[in-house]
Image (cartoon, grey):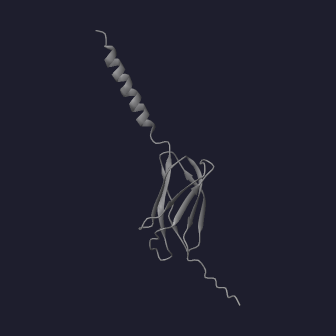
Amino acid sequence: MPVPRSLSAAVLVLVAAATAAAQGNPTGAIRGKVVDPDGLALPGVSVTAASPALQGVRATVTSGNGDYLVPLLAPGEYVVTFELVGFQSIRRERLTVAIAETAQLDVALALAGLSESVQV
């Protein structure tokens, strides 16, 4: 008994959809937490991720809990920078982001040294 064309077409569409779903997400992400020297969460830290795999940079800011997420990154190596007024900046190089993976990068920012100038 021959198979109707509509049934063959439906099976073909389902197989193609399953194959596309199996390929997954072609991007990765970086997530983590930023804390102070006492281990307390630091909200408002500027986090930037740069890579030759990107055009430009991706930036975000830590939440009230010190958490951050930089999503939808092309696979490759990244330089991640953390900056907040009153704290020393941190730069982490060669962080690898893989397809469909989330790289974890937690940091502790040290207090910036005080500088004072007197003008006469």
User: In the displayed structure, would residue 36 be above or below residue 8?
Assistant: below
Farthest residue to the bottom: give it: 120
> Relative to residue 36, is residue 116 depicted above or below?
below
- At which x and y percent is residue 52? 63, 49
Residue 74, position as x, y percentages in the image: 55, 46
For this orientation, the residue located farthest to the right is 120
Image-based side of 77 in relation to 10, left or right: right
Residue at 54% across, 70% down: 84
Residue that sits furthest to the front in the current view = 120
Residue shown at the point (69%, 88%) measured from the top left: 119
The location of residue 94, given as percent across then percent down, is 61, 56
Residue 27 against residue 115 in the figure, above or below: above
At a point 31% along the width and 18% down the height, the residue shown is 7
Choose between 3 and 114: the one closer to the eye. Answer: 114
- Whole-percent x and y of residue 17? 39, 31
Image quadrant containing the N terminus: top left
- Residue situated furthest top in the rendering: 1
Left or right: residue 81 versus residue 119 is: left
Give the quadrant of the C terminus.
bottom right
Query: Which residue: 38% across, 25% down?
Result: 13
How many numbered marks, from 0 up? 0
Say above or below: 37 vs 65: below
Q: Nearer the viewer, residue 54 or 20?
A: 54
In the image, 81 versus 102, the foreground residue is 81
